Image (tube, rainbow, N blue to C red):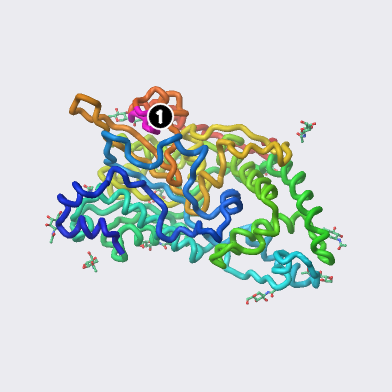
Amino acid sequence: MLSNLALLLASGTLAIACDELPIASWSYDGPPPFQYQTASWDPKVFHKLGGFSPWFPSTGVYGVPGYPGQVPDGCSVDQVQVYMRHAEREASGGTARGIAALVKKLANSTFQSSDPNIQYLQTWNYSYPAEYLSPLGYSDATAAGVAFQHAYSPLLGASFYFNNTGPKIPIRSTDQERVNATANAFAAGMMGFNYSAFSNWLVTPDSSTTFNSTLASNNCPAVNTIDSTANGIFNSYFQPLVRDRLAPLMPGFNLTTNDVGSLMNACPFDSFNRLSPSPICSIFTPEEWLGYNYAYDLNQFDNAGYGGPIGTAWGVGWVAEMIARLNDSAVIPVGSVNTTLDSNPATFPLNSSVYLDFTHDTSLESSLTAMGLFKADYNGNVTLDQIDPNRAWQSALISPMGGRLFVERLQCQSTGNQSTYPFVRMLLNSAVVPLYTLTECNHSWGANQGLCELPLFLESQTFALNGANFSNCYNNYTNVPL
Ligand SMILES: *[C@@H]1O[C@H](CO)[C@@H](O)[C@H](O)[C@H]1NC(C)=O
Ligand SMILES: *[C@@H]1O[C@H](CO)[C@@H](O)[C@H](O)[C@H]1NC(C)=O
Ligand SMILES: *[C@@H]1O[C@H](CO)[C@@H](O)[C@H](O)[C@H]1NC(C)=O
Ligand SMILES: *[C@@H]1O[C@H](CO)[C@@H](O)[C@H](O)[C@H]1NC(C)=O
Ligand SMILES: *[C@@H]1O[C@H](CO)[C@@H](O)[C@H](O)[C@H]1NC(C)=O
Ligand SMILES: *[C@@H]1O[C@H](CO)[C@@H](O)[C@H](O)[C@H]1NC(C)=O
Ligand SMILES: *[C@@H]1O[C@H](CO)[C@@H](O)[C@H](O)[C@H]1NC(C)=O
Ligand SMILES: *[C@@H]1O[C@H](CO)[C@@H](O)[C@H](O)[C@H]1NC(C)=O
Ligand SMILES: *[C@@H]1O[C@H](CO)[C@@H](O)[C@H](O)[C@H]1NC(C)=O
Ligand SMILES: *[C@@H]1O[C@H](CO)[C@@H](O)[C@H](O)[C@H]1NC(C)=O
Ligand SMILES: *[C@@H]1O[C@H](CO)[C@@H](O)[C@H](O)[C@H]1NC(C)=O
Ligand SMILES: *[C@@H]1O[C@H](CO)[C@@H](O)[C@H](O)[C@H]1NC(C)=O
């Protein structure tokens, strides 16, 4: 249950262990034991499924160059906040309905294909319940908890693991099955199966439009008026290209662009359930997956990124809470903050060294947008060869299934001086977030290692602390092109 380190810490050999274990060189949130990114999972495809991508540690454009997750010399972490999207789930909403309709249509047809991957569709059935956390999701979330414990257990101390008398970890989750199941699996991975004895839970409504929640994104009425035109423009170019290539390979089946969309959506979900890559994924070319990934991004970019009027609004409440914990000060009430919950230490404590929050992709993406990170500008009127593979704002990198942001407060010692100063550093899916892209943080000591002095970070968050255009949530954007 607990890793060797926890057992060592618990067994009273702590002093010796700390001297001998290379704690500073551990990679925070390193590859978890259940990671399924094995040779049989082709990362070329599975890293390009937008927010339907299975979790993988990000690299490249999201990492500070040359600095993987180790704590910089002279610094130690004294607080960490986790904001984690639920792990791999079943298809939901319109995606699930589209796949179900396609299965029916395929079953009602007697086409024969010479393509071995398409032949899979001749007998394919898919009848999983929508929305739930999948078995893969359980193991991903548990592995994430194990990796977290491995990285941050020095923060908790021996008594935390040895008996139940230590401070309890505050965990916030929602009443939606996939979110709460992720929270429970993570907690079990981190603390072992007696985790309820080690934690205090606050579970709030997920899908209420009237209950202010910073873990769910239903407090912005304008969303019902927004439709991503960029996504529509791109798909009206992209999906016919794919249909025209595949239709001749499926003689006797009237393949539509809707079917193409549903078939591409089926790749991740069929794979999650098979616990191995679905042959459906191999029906499409790598270039087609680039297009799929881009279409997904356009939709989320207009919704929770820089492309639309409410991209900063959904997630700003959580940013205000994150700042309150970093700064040990009252929550500035913006966005979807619930002031009743956040002014009560029983429901919003400020004295813990670890905080665990479980959420959705839109909230996670929007919080990063509200902070001003991963700024970008794209549109839907591009051809496949014009898509920038290194674009700054990508759902697959920000919030794949199980996407996770770790916000660390560090104390760093200045050279030749015993004083320590507070810093902020963030890891998103294991990659150090380039906080230096925020003007104020660019001036910080350690900026090139992803560090930002806490006072400079707070200065950089003026827009968020003023509400990040939350008032846009009360406008009507019907027929406004995005
Ligand atoms: C099944 O096929 C028949 C004959 O082609 C058609 O009339 C019917 O609408 C189809 N049903 C579905 C669910 O596609
Ligand atoms: C798929 O499987 C489900 C559950 O076993 C069954 O109810 C359904 O009829 C099957 N659908 C097709 C198209 O075979
Ligand atoms: C349990 O934890 C408390 C508080 O840290 C500590 O004082 C005590 O020694 C621990 N009990 C045992 C049996 O280790
Ligand atoms: C969520 O999980 C917590 C901790 O196990 C549990 O106490 C609570 O009842 C669960 N809530 C829902 C709605 O499932
Ligand atoms: C689990 O926690 C409970 C409540 O604190 C405690 O009584 C029990 O001994 C613990 N069980 C184990 C196996 O640690
Ligand atoms: C805020 O939280 C309290 C306590 O759970 C709840 O009673 C109240 O309805 C919530 N208010 C809003 C506006 O969400
Ligand atoms: C193929 O599907 C399209 C869209 O549903 C429909 O308009 C068209 O009539 C169908 N063609 C045939 C040959 O069934
Ligand atoms: C941070 O804390 C200080 C001291 O309590 C307070 O004066 C300041 O307003 C806080 N800043 C923010 C952004 O909450
Ligand atoms: C809930 O959020 C709205 C919108 O920001 C705000 O006006 C209201 O005061 C909040 N209610 C509570 C209890 O925090
Ligand atoms: C934080 O304060 C609460 C009571 O206000 C207490 O129960 C809890 O143990 C404290 N946590 C820490 C880490 O000190
Ligand atoms: C897309 O771009 C082309 C050339 O850049 C332009 O002619 C066309 O009007 C644009 N279409 C839309 C829908 O914006
Ligand atoms: C937004 O405006 C459109 C007309 O432009 C109207 O049909 C729709 O009901 C309005 N939606 C809301 C939520 O007010």
Left/right of residue 225 with respect to residue 131 in the rendered view: right
User: Label 1 sits on what residue type?
Assistant: Asn
Q: Quadrant of the N terminus?
A: bottom left
Q: What's drawn in magenta, residue-wise?
A: 446-454
Left/right of residue 307 with respect to residue 410 in the rendered view: right
What residue do we see at 26% from left, 29% from top? 421
The answer to whether any part of residue 219 appears in the image is: no
Q: Position of residue 372 (x, y in %)?
A: 49, 32
How crowded pointer 1 is (Cα within 10 Å; few <14, some 14-19, many 20+) is rated as: some
As rendered, which of 85 and 467 lies closer to the eye? Answer: 85
> Which residue is identified by label 1?
448
Compared to residue 184, the image places residue 339 above or below, namely above
Q: Quadrant of the C terminus?
A: top right
As rendered, which of 60 and 399 lies closer to the eye? Answer: 60
| Residue 93 within the magenta-colored segment of the rendering | no
Left/right of residue 140 with respect to residue 266 in the rendered view: left
What residue do we see at 37% from left, 56% from top? 145
Most distant residue in the top direction = 443
As rendered, which of 203 and 353 lies closer to the eye? Answer: 353
What residue do we see at 59% from left, 40% from top? 301
Name the quadrant containing residue 164: bottom left
The answer to whether any part of residue 395 appears in the image is: yes
Helix, strand or loop status at disc 1: helix
| Residue 453 within the magenta-colored segment of the rendering | yes
Q: Position of residue 437 (x, y in %)?
A: 47, 29
Q: Position of residue 271 (x, y in %)?
A: 58, 63
What residue do we see at 80% from left, 61% from top? 249
Q: Position of residue 89 (x, y in %)?
A: 53, 60
